[in-house]
Image (tube, helix red, strand yellow):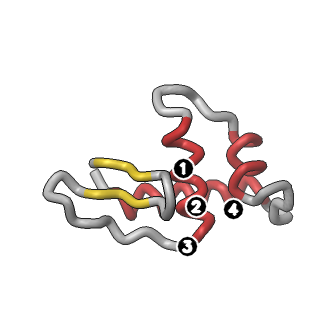
Amino acid sequence: MRYRILGTTQVLRPDGTAVPLGGARLRALLTVLALRAGRAVPAGLLVEEVWDGDPPADATGALQALVGRLRRALGA
């Protein structure tokens, strides 16, 4: 897969077709992870970046749900 993070965040399959992603938070999560490829990213940093300093009440649960959505979107 190829990841494009300049402009609108996109994921492209090897054949060039786009992987449908959800909204802004899912794209933000993918961008944060792509910028730190190959490194562990602390949950606190993910929450800070994805919710831009205004996290939900259950930030840990919300992050887990978002990671699950990203995994389902990207597949194997």
Q: CA distance from mark 1 to mark 3?
A: 13 Å
Q: Which mark is residue 10?
A: none
Which one is earlier in the sequence, the residue at label 3 or at label 2?
A: 3
Above-or-below relation of 47 to 8:
above
| Disc 4 residue type (three-letter) | Ala
| Disc 3 residue type (three-letter) | Gly
Along the line of sight, which residue is nearer the eye, 31 or 6?
A: 6
Which one is earlier in the sequence, the residue at label 2 or at label 1?
A: 1
State the SS at label 4: helix
Tell which residue pokes out farthest to the front in this image. 7
Q: CA distance from mark 4 to mark 2?
A: 6 Å
Mark closer to the observer (2, 1)? 1
Give the labeled residue for mark 1: 31
- Residues at badges 4 and 2 in contact (C-beta under 8 Å)? yes
Q: Which mark is residue 62?
A: 4
- Residues at badges 2 and 1 in contact (C-beta under 8 Å)? no
Give the labeled residue for mark 2: 66
Give the labeled residue for mark 3: 23
